[in-house]
Amino acid sequence: LTASQAERLAPSYKALGDPVRLRLLSLIASHEGGEVCVCDLTDAFDLTAPTISHHLKVLKEIGLVTAERRGTWVYYQACPAALDLLSTVLSVPQEAGV
């Protein structure tokens, strides 16, 4: 990992340092069909809708999720490329024969 890569990735890891955002990303990424309505996310937390919206905004601004408005609801999808990059940094290749 180069210094510039670390500078670019650090904000994503910082955003995921919050337990609510980490859970939100997990719920979005694992949701059947690859997308989830914000109405389904708010029920999973004991938080107000504006608080959930704030956390989703942070995830969106950092590029971990995308959002699409459909009528009065917003649907979220995880960004596979961003998640792949984050997981690649954390993966450790196993040595042959171990």
Image (cartoon, rainbow, N blue to C red):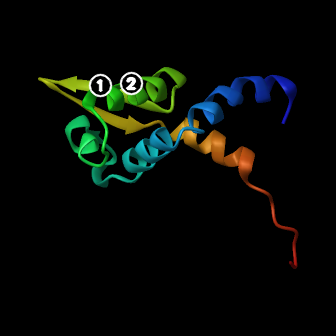
Relative to residue 55, is residue 71 drawn left or right? left
Q: Nearer the viewer, residue 86 or 42?
A: 42
Rendered location of residue 70, percent (x, y): 17, 26
Relative to residue 70, is residue 60 drawn left or right? right
Q: Nearer the viewer, residue 72 or 35?
A: 72
| Disc 1 residue crowd, few under 14, some 14–19, many 20+, Cα 10 Å | few
Amino acid type shown at disc 2: His
**What is the secondary structure assignment of the residue under circle 1?**
helix
Q: Residue at x 28, y 50 (%)?
A: 33
**What is the secondary structure assignment of the residue under circle 2?**
helix
Q: Furthest residue to the left?
A: 71
Rendered location of residue 25, percent (x, y): 45, 43
Which image quarter holds the C terminus? bottom right
Which image quarter holds the N terminus? top right
Q: Residue at x 35, y 28 (%)?
A: 51
Circles 2 and 1: CB atoms closer than 8 Å: yes
Q: Furthest residue to the bottom?
A: 97
Can you tell which quarter of the image residue 92 is in? Answer: bottom right
**In the rendered image, which residue does mark 2 sit on?**
54
Rendered location of residue 27, percent (x, y): 38, 49
**In the rendered image, which residue does mark 1 sit on?**
50
Residue 71 against residue 94 in the figure, above or below? above
Can you tell which quarter of the image residue 72 is in? Answer: top left
Relative to residue 62, is residue 42 drawn left or right? left
Can you tell which quarter of the image residue 16 is in? Answer: top right
Q: Residue at x 44, y 25 (%)?
A: 60
Rendered location of residue 39, percent (x, y): 20, 38
Q: CA distance from mark 2 to mark 1?
A: 6 Å
Residue 82 against residue 30 in the figure, above or below? above
